[in-house]
Amino acid sequence: MEIRAVLETNGRGVLLYADNFPGAFVRGASLAEAMEKWRNEMTAYLRWRDGAAPVGFDFVPRVVQEKCSGLRLEDADSDVLFESEKPPLEREEYERLKELCLRSASGFCTMYESVPEKSRTLFPARETFYGTVPRTAEEIYQHTKNVNSYYFAEIGAEVGNEADMFRCRKEGFAILEQQHGFLKNPVFDGSYGELWTLRKVLRRFLWHDRIHARALIRHGVRIWGSSKVADPFFFLFS
């Protein structure tokens, strides 16, 4: 089994996405640094997705697409649209990816609810491209939840962020599914000149969840220890 990777680089850092494992990614100041992280990332990802660690896996990816970017990739900014994210979806594939997005949201809620003190932090303030980096469990959760309306709006589905993370994402899919021909996966010219498709939204939800779930588990373990914070994404076992 191999990783087909999409490489996004800005000269200061790289993001590598697993094209055939939506949401899985590594990043680093250099390509070599990012490459070293694949084993841990895929071990955690497949334990989460399939309930088993990888067997017979080639952790050296085959790069199938590259993009040079002016974005702050070192802070996990991104705008790449995969070539594989352009074709239409079959209903079965859509349902499978939607289930992963909902499972990811549910797991994030479980992790967040397990944190004993949701307003506590040990980290100094730091600015990034979208504002101040979330530092408490509450801030991390709210930031991760609140991309819901943004992502769905990029493909023409007007939804809110009022409910908890799982419910507002589920409601977003319900509204999306009312659109005629949504599985045809048209390309939308979205905000900031970024191109979007339904496939990309599905991947971005999983990717964005993993970024901030990892930050949340590190935050929780540093303050309370590994026995106090739920780890539904299996980051502590990779």
Image (spheres, grey):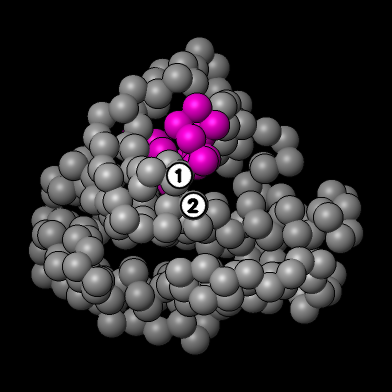
Residue type at mark 1 is: Gly
Q: Residue at x 52, y 82 (%)?
A: 163
Badge 2 or badge 1: first in the primary sequence: 1
Residue type at mark 2 is: Glu
Q: Which residue is mark 1?
A: 13
Residue 184, given in percent of the width and then of the height, sits at: 11, 56
Q: Residues within 10 Å of mark 2 (few under 14, many from 20)?
A: some
Residue nearest the viewer, comparing 221 with 148: 221
Vertical placement of residue 49 versus 62, above or below: below
Residue 199 is inside the magenta segment: no
Q: Secondary structure at mark 2?
A: helix
Quadrant housing the C terminus: top right
Q: Is residue 129 left or right of residue 10?
A: right
| Residue at the limit of the structure toward the top, as seen here | 56
Q: Residue at x 72, y 55 (%)?
A: 217
> What range is drawn magenta here?
16-35
* Residues marked 2 and 1 touching at CB (< 8 Å): yes
Q: Residue at x 79, y 71 (%)?
A: 121
